[in-house]
Amino acid sequence: MASPAGRQYLRKKILDSQPSAEKTADRVQPLPASARMTLEQLFAADKAELDEEEKDSGPSRLFTPHSKPSAQEELINFLPPALRPFLKRMEVGRRREREAAIIDKVGWKALRLLDLNPSALRSAAEKEAWRYGLRFPADDPQYQSADHRRGRDPKVWRSRLKKQVKKARTRIAQLVGAVGGVDVPGRPLYVSDYGIQEYDHELRQSYENMKDLRIVNVDDPAAQISMLDAHKRKKNKEMAKRRLLLDVHMVRADIVAARAIWITTTLDGEYHCNPTNSGGEVKRWNIDLGPDEAMKESQKRHHQTMCLLREQGVRSWGFWDAQAQQDSTPHRHLLAFVHDTEMTEKEVQTLLSDSVSDNVKSQIQASADKRVLEKARAVAVGFRNRFPGTYGCKAYVLGDSHPDFAPPHGKNGTEETAVSIMKYMSRYATRMATGFGEMTEVEGEEGASVPPSDEKRHAVWANERDARLHNWIGVDSQRAAMRVWDCIWKAADRGEIPDDPRMELAVSMMMLAQEHLQDLLVKKAELAEYLKGVELPDADEFVNESNRQLRVMQSAVSATAYHSAVAMGLWADQDLHIKERLWLKGQLDLAENEELPLPPIPIRQDRENVYGEEVRETTGIAAPIILKEGDSDSEPPSRADRGIGEILLTDAVGSWKLVRASDDTRQQIILKTGEWVIVDSETAKRMSDEVVQVRNDAAKRKQDEQNKRLEKVDEWKALRAAYAASEALDSMTENCVAEGKETIDLSSSPDGLSLIPIYPRIGPDGPPTGDFSLEGGPPES
């Protein structure tokens, strides 16, 4: 435990490193006079909390200064124990250089936050929120904006501090040389071992936080699922969706005869901290360029590449993946497809005709392939001219036989294809779509973990840098293409077919894809069950035939999903191949000169978040309604002139249409059909018990009503039996009359005799007048 003098010295250094109110007058208001505290008062107020933080943080990393410590002695005590040996092994000059860089780039405040456990980090966040609340009180009307509410929220500060810790961790690992390195056996790749330990700790903490939470349907609280199961299901769906969309891209490339351009963007040697696979062309690392600067430069080069495609007049489509080199420097792979946009409808009909010779068809296809090949080569040349001399920046045209554009052969000596490159590029993004390091891997003891794999290190790298590992290019982004896909998938799963031609076609094709997918899963399960008790050599023929059937079924899933993607407008209509337009017209039964109906557009609604901000979210899709339209000579409405939910759609010739989503529910697909909330397990159980109690009460009332009905039925049966007996008596009377027996007709009595047996003289109109008395009995006759 640090001494009081050490805590005082540390406290003063931390406070001195923070920006003063004079330097940030535009962002931070000075404290009111009533809330101002001297430095001694602040120390006294925070001393107990600081002691608690240090106690919860485990072994103290703070020095005990018998005299004023030097900067070097002070810094190494602040580093995590796992990173100290790397700094100690450095020579004095380089060590002092790296220590100065750590202090300059990371700062003392971030160093103090390293290695804090969640409770101590939470305490630090609460303290930051308390300090912000002193400057911007919640009861002051002028401090009620969303930013002020965030500043007073400890959760926001905890998120900021965690992000600050991750950035400091990655920067320090590079500066001390804990990743990469040349000819160092056992050197961690991508990230340090310390980063992996912290990642596992975060996973365990997330598991502890999530295992007590449940997602509950507001309308039906009995319908609920645990947060852990929901997390796993979501990740599995993301992985399945990503792999299916990759197959969809491969199917489209085959149908429209597209060429694939494989582009790799890397960074210069000044961004490589300890290069391991970058060769001798790498320059000396610039210690001022850390992980944040490398990620920004990688993003900048990606944007430059996309601008290059637009300058070449290429409307490409495909996907990119981000990966880490062994020294944690990022690079990206881009697989861009280009197809022939000059093929005419007559040429397509000629290719599809059976009466045309193969020679004519081959000439048409060869002309189209030549145009596409020239376009792809132009892109490759333009990319090389944009990034000359950068080691690793390369562009190849897959399937090209020219040595200047053909990619190198794979490690096994085979020629690279679009499918092999796709598998190589997405090996991290698809495997880690489920979130590598799932909760099942950390449920055990903390020290019982296995050595981290290459995929896990890459997952930690992506987590520390908040890196997106995969994304699509060429999709109609203004229409939220991935949301459109999700809505079509949901509608097909629910069996909901909207009243719109393109949405109906998209849902129908997606239903067929889901049926093929279900058959594929059943076939895989049958094969796995069969192989459990059979030796593999004895089942070679069966396995080969089963694998062939699985490939055919997988192709059926991909083909039907691809046609659904064309119908839903995953790619803009102006970017479709002429074959795809003709297929759409045929499926929608349109005339030759009739235009294609517009694809669905997203439904966007505004809502207020917890901080009082208006945020817009996509809740579904709907058929578009055209508000205005014009040609290339007319001026389309600007963004400021458009209303909420209005989208401007343009085509290749410059015509435009201003559309909005239809209000007709029959032409809509809503993504979420119910409102869900996240609550703890105790609250979820109470909500469920209340619903069960209500249902039990309703069932009891229904049962009671049923019992009453049964009782009435029994009573009715008894009355019916009595009525049947009276009918029997009437029949006996009829027999008596039939036999001539004498009867008495009381209805014709002149005295109006009553049917009441006690008082026969009292008729229906009451007792007769006179001296008749009920007490004296009837008079003698």
Image: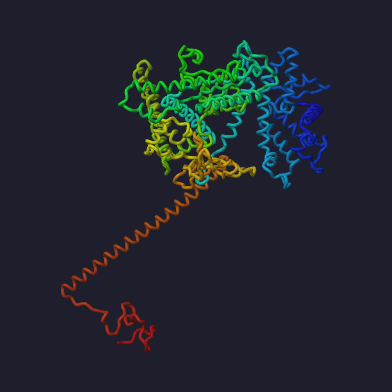
Question: Is residue 125 shown above or below 469?
Answer: below
Q: Position of residue 221 (x, y in %)?
A: 51, 44
Q: Please identify the quarter of the rendering in which residue 82 is found.
A: top right
Please identify the quadrant where the N terminus is shown.
top right
Q: Please identify the quarter of the rendering in which residue 358 is found.
A: top left
- Of 302 and 579, nearer the camera is 579
In the rendered picture of this protein, how many numbered marks are placed on residues?
A: 0
List the single residue furthest toward the bottom.
Answer: 770
Please identify the quadrant where the C terminus is shown.
bottom left
Q: Is residue 176 toward the left or the right of residue 220 in the image?
A: right
- Of 703 and 421, nearer the camera is 421
- Of 578 and 203, nearer the camera is 578
Q: Position of residue 513 (x, y in %)?
A: 40, 32
Residue located 40% across and 22% down the image = 365
Question: Is residue 700 shown above or below 536?
Answer: below
List the single residue furthest toward the left.
Answer: 739
Note whether residue 393 is visible: yes
Q: Is residue 589 toward the left or the right of residue 660 in the image?
A: left
Q: How is the image coloured?
A: rainbow
Question: Is residue 701 shown above or below 344?
Answer: below
Residue located 49% across and 35% down the image = 651
Q: Position of residue 759 (x, y in %)?
A: 34, 80
Residue located 51% across and 18% down the image = 396
Q: Position of residue 342 (x, y in %)?
A: 44, 27
- Of 285 and 575, nearer the camera is 575
List the single residue furthest toward the front.
Answer: 633
Note whether residue 328 is visible: no
